[in-house]
Amino acid sequence: MENNTLTTMLSVVLAFMIVILVILLVVYFVLRSKANKKEKKEPQAKSEEISDTTKDKTKQTTAEYGKQSIFDFMEFDDIIDNMIEQKNGRRFIMVVECQGVNYDLMSNVEKVSVEEGFQQFLNTLRHPIQIYIQTRTVNLESSIETYKARVKEIENKYKDLEYQLKKMKEADYYSDEQIQKVELEITRQKNLLDYGIDIIRNTEKMSKNKNVLNKKYYVVIAYSADELGNNNYDKDEVRGMAFSELYTKAQSLIRTLSSCSVTGRILNSLELAELLYMAYNRDEAETYNLEKEIRAGLMEMYSVSTDVFEKKLQLLDKQIQDEAIDLANQNIEKAKSKLQKMAEKKEEEKDDLVQQMAKLILEENKDYIGDEVAQEAIRELEKQLEEEEKKEQEKKTKTTRTRRTKKEGSKA
């Protein structure tokens, strides 16, 4: 009996424990499912919150990207009177570009003088300055355009000389010496033309190398309108006083820098715009600089193409000019040939003209040399004229005889 009761008690306890374990497992699974549902709901709520915040931010950014925010980003208001204007006309900046010296190639004495000059420059400073260094790729486009214009002039001169030589060879009255002189000048111009073309080709190859860099050094001087105190000056007066103050400081700075062999100059408004353009558009400036942008008219409000008839008129003007130059050259050649013929004719008649002039002089000066002497001298001149005419006549007859004999021999 005791064994039966013990087994029944144990079985009851075991059953009770099993029921409790099942209940605990059911509670665990219920709590776990609720926790999973909450975790699924929370990321959705977070994503909704994030989307709402991003929408608000996009609204704020679109509202902020206006005209005023761009000016705030650029950190300057205007460029006027060789100055950069900031903070709504309360701060002004002037920039001095400096050309340095090669310190390493100097002798010891020169180095000491440069160091002493720089010490003097630092001791004379009475206002704050900033030193700004800008690295740029070397832009050789302006040099290439200058070379091309010069080569075009040489080419035009070379073509004109070739045309002149052609006309001289067609005309038979130019001497060999004159033709050789023009040919020598043509050779010289041809050598110059070939040399100029080689320079342009090499410079264009060099400009394509983006690794060629150039450093520019600037000293920045600033002036604040707060230095004027609480005086009620208008904007133009403040700008004028700022310019005079900055200009005086810049000139003093340039003079003291010259003592250490450093030259300087004040940048004008266009150069200041280029400086800022390079600072804010470094990548674009390498392919499209400010000067090219201004020439292309990208800063204009609108641009229009040239009228068709205006282009035609320009072409006609160019054609008229070229034809006029050719006609002028032809007339010059004709005038030269006429003058040369006159000179040759006068040279042939030189002896006759001399004798006629001598006869006229004797007749005009009869009173001074005496009538008989003058008449005798005139008779002598006439005899000489007759003798020369006879000689000329004999020469002519000889030439005609030789020609006849040559013709008769050729016929035979």
Image (cartoon, rainbow, N blue to C red):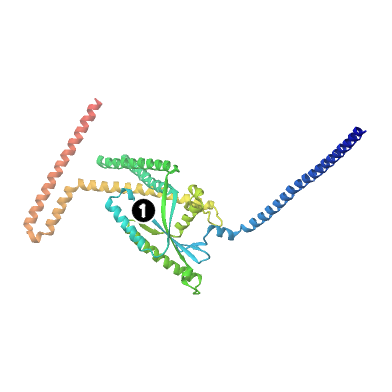
Looking at the image, residue 179 sits to the left or right of residue 268; the answer is left
Q: Residues within 10 Å of mark 1 (few under 14, many from 20)?
A: some
Q: Position of residue 67 (x, y in %)?
A: 59, 59
Amino acid of disc 1: Gly
Number of callouts: 1
Secondary structure of the residue carrying tag 1 is loop
| Residue nearer the viewer, 131 or 273 | 131
Indicate whether 25 appears above or below 324.
Answer: above
Residue bearing the label numbered 1: 100
Q: Whole-percent x and y of residue 301? A: 56, 57
Name the spot of residue 118 as percent of width and height, x first: 34, 58
**Horizontal side of residue 116 vs 66, given as left or right:** left
Residue reaching furthest top?
A: 412
In this view, the residue farthest toward the front is: 2
Quadrant, the C terminus: top left
- Closest to the observer, 165 or 378: 165
Q: Residue at 42% across / 67% down in the picture?
A: 245
Residue shown at 51% from the left, 49% from the top: 284
Q: Does the image show residue 405?
A: yes
Q: Residue furthest bottom?
A: 231
Quadrant showing the N terminus: top right
- Provide residue 190's location: percent of width, then percent of height: 34, 40
Asked if residue 173 shows in the view, the reply is no
The image quadrant of residue 402 is: top left
Q: Nearer the viewer, residue 382 or 321?
A: 321
Instruction: Judge whether 4 appears above or below 389 on screen.
Output: above
Q: Residue placed at 34% from the left, 59% from the top?
A: 119
